[in-house]
Amino acid sequence: MSYRHLHVILFALGVLLAGFAPASVRAQEVEGRLLYQLEVTQPNTRSQGWLGTLFSEDGTAIVAAPGAVVETKIGAFENMPCPYLWSICGFIRKGMLPVTEISDPTALLDDNTWIYRLFIHAEGSRSEGLTGVLLHGEDQVSPTGIRRVETPLGVFLAVNNDGQLWGNSGWFPETWN
């Protein structure tokens, strides 16, 4: 078993034991179920990479062979292999790569972990919507007053649904438009 496979297994176990979200997100009471997570691994090192995880309706991480494509409500995701620590691997949405240009190179040099989580709420109803949460270290990045954030995961854009109980809100990768 390679170190990368061990990292993926330990990460999945950590997600299950942590209840899918750190305390700072739970305190924010993000409603719905976790659909997708993308995180920076080994931040600010030569081994910095990404790890994307899709979650099934029962909350478990979806497992698929490298190269497999999984169609979801939010698009098609390819399971990229994890041959190295610095790989962009796991489930990555088709069209998300390459990373959009970052105008602030210091965004890539950050000791804190960046994590993107996408939740679905009111699933199956006419009020169904998505909420994108962006975490920087232990802190949730608020989309209030900010329209664009540059991260090692690429550029994220804020979506405001004016407090409606339906529709999308929060952060979404710029390449997902």
Image (cartoon, grey):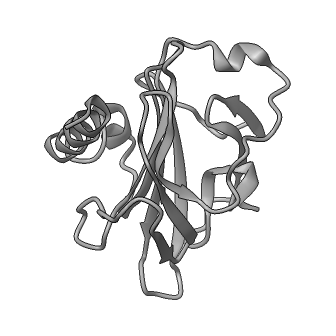
Residue at 73% of width from left, 45% of height from top? 98
Residue at 14% of width from left, 41% of height from top? 17
Q: Position of residue 138 (x, y in %)?
A: 40, 23
Q: Position of residue 143 (x, y in %)?
A: 65, 40
Above or below: residue 88 compared with residue 166 = above
Left or right of residue 127, residue 176 in this image: right
Residue 146 can be seen, yes or no = no
Q: How many marks?
A: 0
Q: Position of residue 47 (x, y in %)?
A: 48, 20
Left or right of residue 81, residue 24 in this image: left
Looking at this view, is 28 or 60 the one in front? Answer: 60
Above or below: residue 148 compared with residue 96 = above
Residue at 31% of width from left, 69% of height from top? 56
Residue at 25% of width from left, 34% of height from top? 2
In the rendered image, which quarter contains the C terminus? bottom right
Above or below: residue 74 compared with residue 46 = below
Residue 129 figure quarter: bottom right
Looking at this view, is 176 or 122 the one in front? Answer: 176
Above or below: residue 77 compared with residue 13 = below
Residue 81 can be seen, yes or no = yes
Left or right of residue 147, residue 129 in this image: left
In the rendered image, which quarter contains the N terminus? top left
Q: Position of residue 79 (x, y in %)?
A: 45, 59
